[in-house]
Image (cartoon, helix red, strand yellow):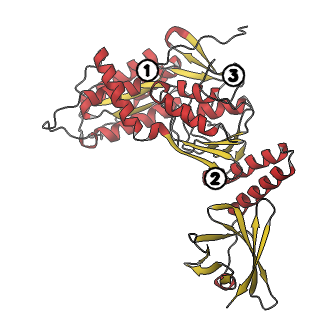
Amino acid sequence: MQLTPPKSPRPIVPRIVLALALAALCRLPAAAQVPGPEELTIDAAMRASTVQKIGEMLKASYVFPETAAKCADHLQAQLSAGAYDNFGVAVPFADALTRDLQSISHDKHLRVNVRPPESASMSTASEPTPHQRREMFSRMKAEMRKGNFGFQKLEVLDGNVGYLDLRGFASAEIAGEAAVNAMAFLSSADAVIIALRNNGGGSPDMIQLISTYFFDEPTLLNTMYWREGDRTDQFWTLPHVPGQRMPDTPLFILTSNRTFSGAEEFAYNMKNLKRATLIGEVTGGGAHPGGRQPVNDVFGIFIPVGRAINPISKTNWEGTGVEPDVVLPAEKALALAHSKAIESLIAKATDPEEKSRLEWAKSGVEAKMNPIALTATDLARYAGTYGERKVWVEDGSLKYQRKGMPARTLVPMSKNLFAVEGVPFFRAQFEINDAGKAVRLIGLYDDGRSEPMERSGD
């Protein structure tokens, strides 16, 4: 048994990223008139040669050799039966091939696509030169920087809960600095929520990097089996990361049916290691890494050449997706995760004042989860002036303004209690007389103070 983690191999940029970037370096001149992918037409010879070539490629490199042979035979049978005879345009033919391949393999990564016109002029056997690789890296980094390398949003929610909306796992070589900065932002939070609801996957080395921040001991995250060389690679947490680790910080991961591939791996790893609580929808179900390869000048194919084997479950999420600990619609996952994060902090709190503040924050989150609808008559009864504070109805909601401060919306928590949007430490509670009219506004603070204000002049 191996007692210490092996030294991590140097990360390799996925082949699909290399191919796309190299294509960008080799674009055709602007004057060249080439049809777009939707306009490319094909004939019977192209259909036959494409089916033949895909079969050969699958047999040579698809991670499951027996399934590769079945897929190749199925495509040939479909071709012989005339199933593809009516496809004179490339895109529908690629879609049909994908459906037929997945009907046999049940592999969501195995897909045929129409190659961009600018990539069709490249030799399928050519390798980028060192200069091209440097240029490619610079262009990739510049392009990905426009989307902040997938780090869409960082925020501190009520209760000191850190929130990261992560849209992709870019290569750590390209996006490592952004990841380290994001983890530094989260390191002062008492609980962390990472949203992967719009994350389609990415590079294993970024999964390694981010995962490492949530462990303080060497931890085996995942293993990958590769058909080439019949080898298995282990992915451990890294021996060192810049900044502060968060091994004891409660972690919640949000998923949806759009969460796919590497994003699923991150969620699956953390679930099996019992390091995070998953909330949301069952994920897409793609566990076989690979790369996009050219078939000919018109078509390309993504061929999975490996498969994940989790060291705990001894299997993966291919075809089934990752089952969250709490299953509910993705759009409701953040509110529930926020509530559960604060709940976990309340359970650990020993200081009465801190516990009171957390309970205050939790009640506000739960009010947003279960909004209360008030009628126009209900809202009108609160309108008025209370000392230096004014309340009025505008566009179907209640507005609140303290003298010299901006106007804010009051969010109902109960019939007479309102949160003030954007002011988490203050709430407004109204006292109603027997005639059903508000006569007093009591300002409530999260430290236990209260400030009553009588209604005046109206």
| Camera-nearest residue between 156 and 200 | 156
Q: Is residue 12 left or right of residue 409?
A: left
In whole angstroms, how far apart are the C-alphas of marks 1 and 3? 25 Å
Q: Which mark is residue 427?
A: none
Residue carrying label 2: 329
Indicate which disc, 1 or 3, sits on the residue closer to the N terminus: 1
Quadrant of the rendering where the N terminus is positioned: top right
Total tally of numbered discs in the picture: 3
Q: Is residue 345 visible?
A: yes
In whole angstroms, how far apart are the C-alphas of marks 3 and 2? 29 Å
Residue carrying label 1: 58
Q: Nearer the viewer, mark 3 or mark 2?
A: 2
Quadrant of the rendering where the C terminus is positioned: bottom right
The x and y percentages for residue 312 are 72, 23
- Quarter assignment of residue 428: bottom right
For image coordinates 61% across by 28% down, the residue present is: 243
Q: Which element type, helix, strand or loop, lies under badge 3?
A: loop
The x and y percentages for residue 356 are 82, 55
Q: Which mark is residue 314?
A: 3
Looking at numbered disc 3 in the image, what kind of residue is underneath it?
Answer: Lys
The x and y percentages for residue 190 are 72, 42
For image coordinates 69% across by 80% down, the residue present is: 387
Q: Nearer the viewer, mark 1 or mark 3?
A: 3
For image coordinates 74% across by 56% down, the residue present is: 361
The x and y percentages for residue 245 are 67, 29
Looking at numbered disc 1 in the image, what kind of residue is underneath it?
Answer: Leu
Rendered view: 111 above or below 375: above
Rendered view: 61 above or below 210: above
Rendered view: 422 above or below 257: below
